[in-house]
Image (tube, coloured by chain):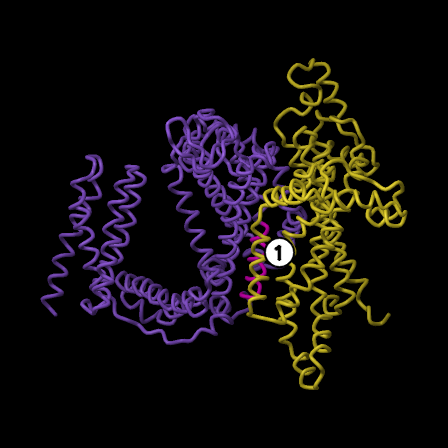
Chain colours: A yellow, B purple
Amino acid sequence: MIQLAGLGRYLVRRAITFIPTIIGITLLTFTIAFYTPADPARAWAGGQKARPEVVEQVRKMYHLDEPFWTQYYFFMRHILSGSIYSPVTHNNIIVEWMQGFIVTANIAVLATFFTIILGIPLGIIAALRKDTAIDNAVRLLALIGYSTPSFWIAYIFVWIFYDVLRWITLVGVPIPSRIITGLFVIDAIILGEFNILDAIVSRLLLPSFILAFISFGGLARYVRNTMLDVLSSDYILYAHARGLPPFRVWKHALKNSLIPVVTVILFMFAGLLSGAIITETVFQLPGIGYKYVLAINNFDIPSIILYTLMTGLFIVITSLLVDILYAIIDPRIRL
Amino acid sequence: MGVIWIKIAKRLDKFTDKIIDIYAALREFISPGWKTKNRSKVSELKLMLRAFNRSPLAWTGLTLVLLFIIIGIIGPYVAPEPYWEVYVYPKNMPPGWVDSNGVVHLFGTDYYGRDLLSMILWGARISLVIGLAVIALGVPLGIILGLVAAYYGGKVDEVIMRIVDVFYSFPALVLAIALSATLPSRIDILLREVPILKDFLVLLFGIRPEHGGYLATTVSIIVAMAVVWWPVYTRLLRAVALSEREKVYVEAAKALGLSDRTIMFKHILPNTSSVLLVTITIDLGSIIILEAALSFLGLGPQPPLPEIGRLISDGRAYWPEKWWLIIIPGAFLFIVGLGWNLLGDGLRDIFDPKTRRSIEFGIKERPIMVHDIIGLLGDIAIIAGFLTAGIVYRDAPGMVILFAPLVLLYVVWKGLNTVRFLSRHYVGYALGLIAYLWLITALAKFLPSTYPSGLIVLCGVVLKMSSEEIGKRRGVK
């Protein structure tokens, strides 16, 4: 435990910067919604034809006639107590968010999985064969990934895999009879429901593959660069000089270059968890991103705020986790 | 393949060296003594461009980006069909469709029965202006805050970085959607109360003045993306400026008693420019794609304004039978995005001393000749001629007439060069240009009466001056 000296102090310091960020996020999202000039009460009461007393009632109900801070207080109280309802669909938003989150989490896990199995080997190969055709190909792949509009590539893949090959389906979200881990694929395997597994794979495979397609080149590039940095460091030179076989040297290099790579993957995963808005819209998957777009179209302000808030929270918490992870691994940070 | 590329790169080297030499000569002309003071800078620039020449990907990127910018600037003027005349043709016609007047529509027609090619040309302007506007709004704010945070440190730094953290906590798309969904009605009021702003934007986007009312949503996505983007630059600038702050030149500037503002903007900022340039280039690609994504979701410019993401969104219902509605605009976006990314990546390499060092030295300085400048003027005259013929007169035969002598002269000049008739490169070039201008004036007689006005007068003047010049040079020799 002596090795972790100073960790507590570091955590306290990190928490001091963490809390204002959370408050800032809630304030920012609330401000965006608060300064919406169109009258939400009228929209929720039924549009232009709504009777004035109904509009007034709706306005009272959602505290829309109160000043900024009171509204903020009410909003935060309801979120913390978990009882906040959408004025458009009349559902509990937090419950709805969770339903969307399960779908999104499934896609995010699959997408991250594909990104890792494609990106890391490619990056390692590119680093070991620096300045060759493979290296240039990885570089080009990364750039193609950055510059591909996801809504465009999605339609091309839909054409290949749905209209030509008939490998995938585009309606409904199949769910195994019991949810154990929350990941549909694993649940279906545990329960032995292989027809549902087949349906899940053919529904969720393509969206997650598209998300992976966009990011795996970038990950490969990152792995290549960190790997090259490590390969040019002194202890690798020493390992070579000591006469270690190349395979053993690479093992040392890989171990050290994977730490920054893990953080990148974590951030990518957090970003995916906040909803792949475009991909979910194209595939009509009822995840968070799809629901977010629906809320925007319906002018459903509480939902908009909650969804924005949750995405912000996810990323802040991830960065906190990454920092703590680093502090445990690398003692210099705790200083 | 590699050998061919090296050959091309060596040719490009000559060209880029010439450009830098001309630039240096101009600076020397404006402020005598510049060249001796900045000799290392000149050779550094040459070396950078040589590094750039050796990267085929970077050149592809630059070509694509230049094409996009040219299309963005001249697109609205050369578009064969106006965007505001809807339902002229049957909607969603395939590429190569011929209408009743016998006009071929290269990319077919869109959801509103307009020529798709024209819509992409109009839309390119909108994409370009939105991209540049986001950079113009977001980057200065980011730069100032980043510099201030890094330079002063302490509490100022802490406050600024906490605000940045808040903005960083949202994926770009989520925050941009939330903002662009709530902003339009406020922007609408702003546009109505400040008509000058509206007129200016109408001019920038190249749209009809009566469509100024549709700009509220367009401006709101610009503002939304600028709000999303500035923290990127604050973080970047702070990181770079923190390491710059510790360097000796900053200490020297402080010792001289310069003000904080001078040190920040005149001394630290120029040293971060390479990083900034790379990031801006790459970000322009991302901004154009993000903007299309927002339009795809129904935010951003509303019909009848042609917007590329919107064109794709309109074609969704007809996929995959009418594939061109999605494939063609999407391919355009992809190529534009790839262009910016390739260029940015290439720039990153040439600013990196490690890559640059691998290129052999051997940069010699060559005195600037008058014919170099005549040659450059000739290039400008040719490009201006094309633009005038293309944009102002919309004159296809005129463009052919401008182009045909050029090809002819190139062939003749090349032939003379191979038999060593013309020993000096630039004299031949200048001679060729003069002959070209003469040919245009000669050919202009056969053109429709509208064409030979301003351009030909310009040509005449240049012709007169440069023929004397050439005569003098010959006499000297």
Work out whether A207 lies above or below B85.
below
Which residue is labeled 1 in the image?
B157
Residue A15 located left or right of residue B69: right
Question: In the displayed image of the protein, which residue is found farthest to the bottom?
Answer: A242
| In magenta stretch: residue B233 | yes
The answer to whether residue B195 is left or right of residue B228 is: left
**A18 part of magenta stretch:** no
Residue range in magenta is B231-244
10 Å crowding of disc 1: few (<14), some (14-19), many (20+)? some
Instruction: Measuring from the top left, give residue B385's x and y in whole percent.
Output: 26, 46
What element does badge 1 sit on? helix
Q: Which residue lies at the image location 69% right of the left edge and 45% below the top edge?
A: A207
The image shows residue A214 at horizontal and vertical percentages of 63, 51
- The secondary structure that dominates the magenta segment is helix
Name the residue rendered at 67%, 41% in the picture.
Answer: A162
> Which residue lies most toward the front here?
A165
Q: Nearer the viewer, residue B281 or B198?
A: B281
